[in-house]
Amino acid sequence: MRICVIGGANVDITATSAQAFRFADSNPGSVHVSWGGVGRNIAHNLVLLGDDVELLTIFCGGLFGPVIEASCRDLGMHTDHCGTAREGTNSFFVSINNANGELVGGVADMNATEGMTREWLRERLEVINKADAVVADANLSPSALGWLIDNCNGPLFIDAVSVAKAPRIADAVELSRKKSFFALKSNALESQVLGSLPGASIQRRYVSAGAEGLRVEENGRLYEFPALPCIVRNVTGGGDALLAGIVHAGPGASVEESARWGLECARRAVESPDAVSNEIKNIII
C-alpha cells in the first residue's frame, strides 16, 4: 500500500533512570540518542511493515537535518518533497523515563514543523492524493490540518501527538469545511482534552490506554481490546507503532483486524529500547 505520512522528524534524546527517579536531583542512568518524531516514527514502522512510504516533513536546520534525511532515505522512505528549515531551527524531543521505562516527562522543540503551512501542503497536494492512505500528526498547525481535511482525497488518519498539541485537531475541524476524516488516534489523556469534537464526523476513534489496552469507537459502537503481554523497556514510540499497525491493516480492515495489527506493533515497540523496533518487520498476523 502507498502511504503518505505528514508530520515531525526530529532528534530523540531519551534518558532512563537506573533506579527510582528522584525529582530535582541528578539520577544515574543511561542516555540514548536516535532519530524520531511522530510522523517519522510512523513512516519508519510502515516501511518495516512493507508499505511504500512518502514522508513529507521539514528537517531541522544545521547539523542534524541532513543526517536525519539521509537516514530516512536509507530506510526506504521517499523524501524528495521534504524541506529543510533555516539554520538554528530545531526539531528535538528530550524525554526522561523512570527505571520501568515509563515516561516521567519530556520537552519537545518542534519549531521546524511550523513551516508545514497550508501553502506548503498545497504545493505537494498531487503527491498527497496519489496515496492509498494519508497520515498526519498534530505537529501541523490548525490551519494546515484544516486545509488537509478539506483537500485530502484518500482516507486520512490523524495522530493527536500530545495533550499540548491535541487541541489543534479541534481547531482544525472548526476551520474545515468538510469536518470529516477517516480516523483519529489519541491516548486517554489526549482524548479527554479533545472531548466529543462536536461537529466532526470521524469514522473511527482509536484511544490507547496503555496497559489497559485499546478502545475503538465506530458508528456509535465501542470496542475494547486488551493490551498484549509484554516487558516494557521504553514507552516512547509505542503510540506511533500502534497507529502504523492500524494504517498498515488498511482503511478497509475491520475494527478487530486493525486493532490486532496496532496492538502487536505497539507491543514490539515498547519492548525495544528504541522508539522503533526492527522486530516489527517480523510480524505475521
Image (spheres, rainbow, N blue to C red):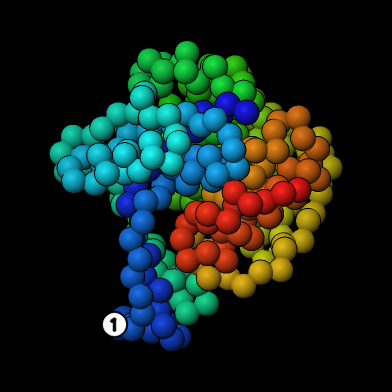
Residue at position x 36%, y 80% from top?
A: 29
- State whether residue 102 is above or below residue 213: below
Q: Secondary structure at mark 1?
A: loop
User: From the viewer's perspective, is 179 left or right of 137?
Assistant: right
Q: Decide: few, some or many residues near mark 1? Use Cα within 10 Å; few <14, some 14-19, many ≥20.
A: few
Q: Is residue 175 visible?
A: no
Which residue position holds label 1? Answer: 26
Percent position of residue 126, x then y: 47, 13
User: From the viewer's perspective, is 86 left or right of 234?
Assistant: left
- State whether residue 100 is above or below residue 261: below
**Quarter of the image where one finds residue 153:** top right
User: From the viewer's perspective, is 254 left or right of 178?
Assistant: right
Total tally of numbered discs in the picture:
1
Residue at position x 26%, y 32% from top?
A: 84
Depth check: give the residue in front, 197 or 133.
133
Percent position of residue 27, x then y: 33, 82
Depth check: give the residue in front, 134 or 104.
134
